Amino acid sequence: MNLKDDILIEHFLRNELSKKEITDFLDRLKTDSKFKEHFLIEKQLFQTLNEDKWSFIENVDSKEIITYKNIYDKSDALKQILKQENTNYQKNLKKKNTSKLIYFVAASIVAILFVISSVFNVKETPQNLYASYINNLDLPSLITRGATNNDLAKAQQYFEDKNYKEALPIFKEALINQTKQKATLYIYTGISQTELHKYTKAEKTLNHLINSDLLGSSKGYWYKMLLYLKMNDVEKAKSILTKITSDKSNYNYEEAQKMLQKL
Amino acid sequence: MTHNRDPSFYLNALLEENTKEIQVVYQRYFPKVRKFVLQNKGQQQDAEDIFQKALLQLTIRYQKEKFIIKSSFEAYLFTVCKNLWRRELNKSKNKVTNYEVIELKAENNDMALSILEQKRWELFDETLNLISENCQKILKLFFAKTPYSEMVKQMNYNSETVARQRVFKCKAKLIELVKKDTRFNSLKEL
């Protein structure tokens, strides 16, 4: 093989020949067997070693092909197995990916909420705060040993059953007639009024407690603050909380500090 | 530990239709093949087809001749998949350009041909690695259709004429070695 022919083959393989040159080239392949042999191997090398191409077998007289074909013909079972194994693998992968995705989405939501709450410092709503305290009240009981006032026991039961309408008149009457547990009675009354949306009256009741010299009068601040929460008046609630936190001896001093941060 | 298994371990597992190990093969090697196919104009379905065809090809070949994989099983399987995909892509190219149309042969016959083509690829690839490094380098540029002007720059030649002569000599050496290989006889085209 000379360089000239080699360059000619190269031009042919790279599609760099004119129509006329291609016709001459193909004619020569028909007549010049040496040239053809060289061309075929060049072509195979070119197509095999160029990553974008592939060298197809075109004219090989090989018993090997028949042998392989015969094995392929008898391999239906193996084909089925491979098909099934592919299906199994892809299915499992999908399942895994789905659960991964669910996990990822859940984690993302948590992360996003976290970011939102830290960036925008989302506060709890006053209503929620109010509810969380009112549902966890730990008030002193009004039923004392040897007490004769059965009404008060009844009122407390009403109160616990959230039947404030029945409870309130009894508390109010007791406030007039009783001398004991007055601070606690004010609180029961104030809360009942708050719950019944009698805000002005509730405020008045709690102010009475605050301005009294009763033991536990500072509790009045706390419940008045809750009243303001219920009224959605965050500013007033805050100003009371500030007042509570100004004196360590005040009822719920520490709780008030926490609450201030939440608001 | 199991990652470095002898390549024949998987060939035997395929031959014995050991579904447990076939799953292992899928778990370890399918993702890379899928990635390759998707990056080269293919879809998920193509990747699945190619992988199945490759496993089938390995099994059938191993059934006929207990060939030895010189590299790792992973590298070998990947090459077979890559070549099968190159083959698929060029199949459609051939259909479109109508240049030496490939007849649509029966599938089993087509797959039998793909084995011979793979063997030819192996012969050429191995032979290429036998010639000098310098020759390998210039031939790789040549087969990648690099213009001679570019070859001159990359290989530090004086002129394109020098580059042409180098390509000519290296190619002659490669062809000489290919022809010497006994495998070439059964792959020779008429």
Image: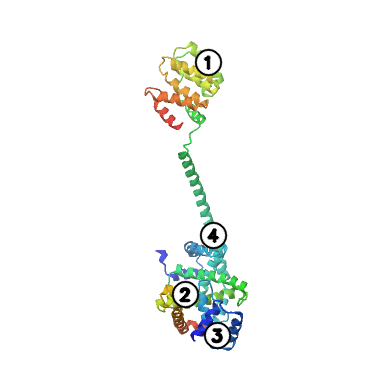
Q: CA distance from mark 2 to mark 4?
A: 48 Å
Q: Residues within 10 Å of mark 2 (few under 14, many from 20)?
A: few
Tell me the amino acid under the disc marked 3. Lys
Instruction: Name the secondary structure under disc 4.
Output: helix
Q: Residues within 10 Å of mark 1 (few under 14, many from 20)?
A: some
Tell me the amino acid under the disc marked 4. Gln
Q: CA distance from mark 1 to mark 4?
A: 73 Å
Q: CA distance from mark 4 to mark 3?
A: 48 Å
Q: Residue at x 43, y 73 (%)?
A: B153
Which of disc 4 and disc 1 is earlier in sequence? 4
| Residue wearing tag 4 | A90
| Residue wearing tag 3 | A36
Q: Report if the CB atoms under discs 1 and 4 are less than 8 Å apart.
A: no
Q: CA distance from mark 1 to mark 2?
A: 107 Å
Tell which subunit mark 3 falls on.
A
Q: Is residue A140 visible?
A: no
Q: Residue at x 50, y 62 (%)?
A: B35
